[in-house]
Image (spheres, helix red, strand yellow):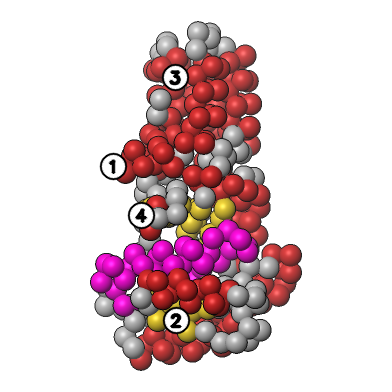
Amino acid sequence: MNFLQRMKEGLERTRQGFMAKLTEVITGRKFDDSLYEDLEELLLLHDVGVEATAYLIAELKKQVKERKIATSDELRHLLQDIAGKTLGSKQPLRYREGTLNVYLVVGVNGVGKTTTIGKLAERFKKGGSKVMVAAGDTFRAAASSQLQIWAARAGVAVVSHADGADPAAVVFDALHAARSRHIDLLIIDTAGRLHNKSNLMQELGKIKRIIDREAPNALQEILLVIDATTGQNALVQAQEFAQIVPVSGIVLTKLDGTAKGGIVLAIAKEQKIPIKLIGIGEKLADLRDFDPQEFAAALFAE
């Protein structure tokens, strides 16, 4: 099965709701204010967000006139084209050969951080990298044991302390272990207690300072994991975490389990943080590098 076909299947719930209604809205209609109002409502209902929706509608009106669009089919293709451009260019995970790479994984509890870390560990291990994971979420009961299960499955080393230990101490030990064992990639799990934002801010800030101090030459990615099924709450989480740490990329999980796939457009337009990975299923191969053009093609496919 090729990538586009798998993507279509992963986005099936979003496509079924969105494309069926889009076809209903634009078929046999005049391209007037009434049509654009209905399109605006449709986009907002599918969590495209206020800013992204306003931009899409404004661009659509402008280009319909410029390109002399006359049919509903042309209109759908034009909307796909504008959506693809709104999502920007492909920005894969950064990884540098011959040095330590550190991926700090952040996000609220329940979004799929541990699963994402396990899949990343397995992906890079299969690609020939020497991988280690650090159980930096010492707050949540069983977080460390869950990560150890994923690490064992991937066949990678794990550094952990007892529940309730200082997460920064775990990261410190993991960085020293990574250097002594010539690790290529260290992936660090973290707690996600947004309801206690001041503690989380202090904790993540301390972890970031330790990484900068103990591994100054390491390539760093700070990856925010967001659950796509939360819709507009995903925007709130992105805003909150971007205030705490310099997020370099977003991992959007559970896209296959939601009709709210439009949140991808909202994040791209409002947060200016690149979506680097998306989860469209349970298998290792279902954690995909995000390709904006292929996503738009899959979303608007009939």
Q: Amino acid at mark 1?
A: Asn
Check residue 2 in the rendering and tell me which mark sits there, or answer none. 1
Q: Which residues are magenta?
A: 102-131
Q: 133 left or right of 47?
A: left
- Element on which disc 1 rests: loop
Looking at the picture, which amino acid does disc 2 mark?
A: Val
Disc with the residue nearer the chain's start (2 vs 1): 1
Residue nearest the viewer, comparing 260 with 285: 285
Front position in the image: 181 or 161: 161
Task: Nearest to the eye among marks 3 and 1: give it.
Answer: 1
Q: The residue tagged with tag 3: helix, strand or loop?
A: helix
Q: Are the two marked residues, 4 and 3, in contact with CB atoms closer than 8 angstroms?
A: no
Image vertical order of residue 65 relative to residue 57, above or below:
above
Q: Name which of mark 2 and mark 3 comes first in the sequence.
A: 3
**Which is nearer the N-term, disc 4 or disc 2?**
2
The image quadrant where one finds the C terminus is top left
Relative to 55, is 176 above or below? below
Query: Residue 139 at what x, y percent from top left?
Result: 65, 77
Q: Give the Cα distance between marks 2 and 3.
A: 52 Å
Task: Give the residue pinned by disc 3.
Answer: 75
Q: How far separated are the C-alphas under marks 1 and 4?
A: 12 Å
Decide which of tag 3 and tag 1 comes sooner along the chain.
Answer: 1
Alpha-carbon span between mark 4 and mark 3: 33 Å
Disc 3 to disc 1: CB gap under 8 Å: no
Disc 4 crowd rating (10 Å Cα; few below 14, some 14-19, many 20+) is some
Q: Say which residue label 2 marks.
A: 158
Which residue lies at the image location 52% right of the left edge and 84% below the top edge?
A: 160
SS class, disc 4: helix
Queried whether the magenta region covers residue 201, the answer comes back as no
Q: Amino acid at mark 3?
A: Leu
Residue found 43% across the figure and 30% down from its top: 300
The Cα–Cα distance between marks 3 and 1, rounded to whole angstroms, is 27 Å
